[in-house]
Amino acid sequence: MISFHRRKILRAICKIIFITVILSISATGGSYAKEIQKEKIVILFGHRFPPFYSINKSNESSQNLKGLFIDILENFTKSHPQYKLEYKCLPRGRINKVLAAENADAFALTDPMFVSKEINSKFAPSLPLWKIGDHLLVRKNSDIIDNNIEDLRGKRIAVLHGNGYGPLDEYFDKDIIHKHSVYRTSQILELVTKRRVEGAICNEMTLPKLMSRSSHSINSFRIIEKPLYEYNLHLLIKRSKTDFLEDFNIFITKNKIPTIKHTVQHK
């Protein structure tokens, strides 16, 4: 028969074991709660904007993005585990509708001058990451040698559907310059080659990589050296996501962002 003293000791041991189990469950539950309380940030992308981002696989899954900006976002999440970033690739025209409806938290990468007043009222730009410019692309034997508005007056210029073109938009709207919208860079190159347009708006930095996916050679074209306009690339962030905007800006300030030239040289 177990003595009273031994029963007392056994009760104490059982009590300790019980408390330990409860604390263990609580700790596990707390960790789980922390995990599920991560703030999800949905970021919209186009399909390809090299070297900043591109879809890595043929199935064009939003989970297969790679590039300079993706590397930056991955480093950001390592230092800010409270956020869970989700990427979605959409056509540019669709992106405008999703942003206007506030059905995403951010858009990469653009300048506020390329989106509507409505979207700008709902989304704020991060600190600038890079500065680039858009150029005029023409056939190699084109008689266009400059990109002044007077030189482009009455010309047919190919653009990507849904994109904004900053200071040129008013000339397109007034039909001073005739805009021909298509959905892919390959279509733009085809239009220029077949003389259905006099030129196209392109980004000198992204064009070579995009052209490598087509049957066209860069040697068939000429890029007017002087840019049509220059602009900064930002991450547009929903204004209600104040903590994320502040954290991302601090991250940009504290971390050295690789230059485009450095990136291209080492790819």
Image (cartoon, rainbow, N blue to C red):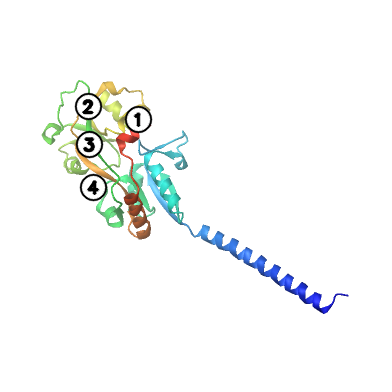
- Gap between marks 2 and 3 measured at Cα: 15 Å
Q: Position of residue 220 (x, y in %)?
A: 27, 21
Neighbour class for label 2 at 10 Å: few (<14), some, many (≥20)?
Answer: many
Tag 4 secondary structure: helix
Q: Is residue 186 visible?
A: no
Q: Which mark is residue 209?
A: 1
Label 4 belongs to which residue? 113
Q: Amino acid at mark 1?
A: Lys
Q: Which residue is mark 2?
A: 138
Q: Nearer the viewer, mark 2 or mark 3?
A: 2
Q: Give the foreground label among 1 and 4.
A: 1
226 versus 126 height, above or below = above
Question: Is residue 62 in view from this perspective?
Answer: yes
Q: CA distance from mark 4 to mark 2?
A: 25 Å
> What is the distance, in whole Å, between disc 3 and disc 1 at their CAs?
24 Å
Q: Is residue 205 left or right of 6 when viewed as pictured? A: left
Report helix, strand or loop for mark 1: helix
